Amino acid sequence: MTFEASPPRGVRWLFLDLNSYFASCEQQEQPHLRGKPVAVVPMPTDATCAIAASVEAKAYGIKTGTSIWEAKERCPALQCVLARHDLYVRYHHRVIEEVARHTPIGKVWSIDEMASKLLPLKQSVPEAMALAQRIKDGLRRNVGECITCSIGLAPNAWLAKVASDMQKPNGLVVLEGQNLPEALLGLELQDLCGIGANMAARLNRAGIWTMRQLWDTSPKQMRAIWKNVEGERFWYRLHGYDVPDLETGKSVVGHSRVLDFESRRPDVARDVCRRLTVKACQRLRRYEMFATHFYLSVRLCDGRRWGHDVRVPPSADTLTFVRLTHALWDAMTDALQPDRIKKVSITLMGLQETAETTGDLFEVAARKEARIEPANKIRSTALSAAMDQIARAYGPHAVHFGNQPQTQAGFVGTKIAFSRVPDLAEFTE
């Protein structure tokens, strides 16, 4: 790794973190929720957990992962709102449009986080702070008064993210290179992005308990603690160096769903699982990629789990993977004899950009070999293309495989993950 001889002084990056994003979108859309404690939930039951909490709910100690029954004990006035992932994606694009009016967006980190490398004329602290305030004002004026953000300014994007977490909600924090490490010494190790409970325990075993001790650790020590080069990269980021991100390609396409209570019967759960497969295949074709492995897993309400993967010739047609879904589902029911199923997941793996292959054998759940005949392959590929065209012209339910499962959210499979923002097209596939 090669870096600048010394870390830059001043600020070079702006990091924006939207405050209580899902809940804020709901408060913007539903004015009667403004100023009230709100929890966004995946299903309308006290047995579920909050996937987001408003600023007002956080004042009661309610956060992502808090069970709703516990949240209601802490705050009887809590308003629970069913998640609308399509709404949050639409607001995400409105936010990006507004931020881009003020500064180039270098990287979208997640649905509610993005970073901008500041233009040279904006790298002085006064100019950067003025820019940050214009972004805040623009969001309030052009996106919604409930859509607020915390902004961090720092020598690199990682430190700017740390700064954005130091003052919430609606914060603006500057970490200048010349003020390090003093500006960080009040933080706990787990306040830093990349240090979770397991890494904190590993640091503790190495005798590192405080920010000062972490700062004084050498790059080689950090590499040894992390057991890979990422530890050394972490050290350089912490010390203000602008470390470029490693380029990574798309490696998997998948969907999972915790089932609504009325969908937990095995027959209905299979319909949901098949629908997840169909949506994943549609995404695969939009990316113009092919999968070489298919994985299906389930979690039962009694806690038992089952998972199995199948290797396939490079494929992107829906029929191939629907047949595999049925075969693996039958193998699962034979093995577990399930009564109620809580969660289903499917993943297309081993992605590649070409369909070249040296063989056409794949394993099915019963561990018998099966052959995809070339003629069948051509027909199923043509069928998938035709179904995509019909769906685009007449809607996602115009033609489909088997029963179409209904969910309380109105769509199956599509949801926002930590580092993946769904395409709007996914909500209509």
Image (cartoon, rainbow, N blue to C red):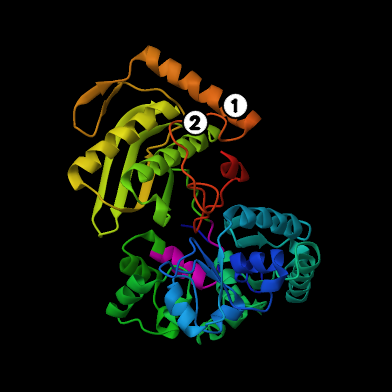
- Residue 281, compared with residue 98, is above or below; it is above
Label 1: which secondary element: helix
Q: Name the residue under label 2.
A: 400
| Residue 287 visible within the image | yes
Label 2: which secondary element: loop
| Residue 14 visible within the image | no
In the depicted view, which residue is nearer to us: 220 or 60?
60
CB-based contact (under 8 Å), mark 2 and mark 1: no
Split into 4 quadrants, where in the image is the C terminus?
Answer: top right
- Residue 223, compared with residue 59, is above or below; it is above
Structural distance between the alpha carbons of marks 2 and 1: 10 Å
The three-letter code of the residue at mark 2 reads His
Residue at (45%, 73%) from the top-left corner? 68
Q: What stretch is highlighted in magenta?
A: 231-244
The three-letter code of the residue at mark 1 reads Ile
Q: In which quarter of the image is residue 215?
A: bottom left
Residue at (53%, 35%) from the top-left corner? 287
In the depicted view, which residue is nearer to us: 147 or 250?
147
Q: For residue 205: magenta?
A: no
Left or right side of 44 for 263:
left
Q: Name the residue under label 1.
A: 390
Q: Residue furthest front?
A: 262
Q: In which quarter of the image is residue 316?
A: top left
Residue at (78%, 64%) from the top-left corner? 121
Left or right side of 196 for 364:
left
In the depicted view, which residue is nearer to us: 240 or 100?
100
Mark 1 Cα shell of 10 Å, populated few (<14), some (14-19), many (≥20)? some
Mark 2 Cα shell of 10 Å, populated few (<14), some (14-19), many (≥20)? few
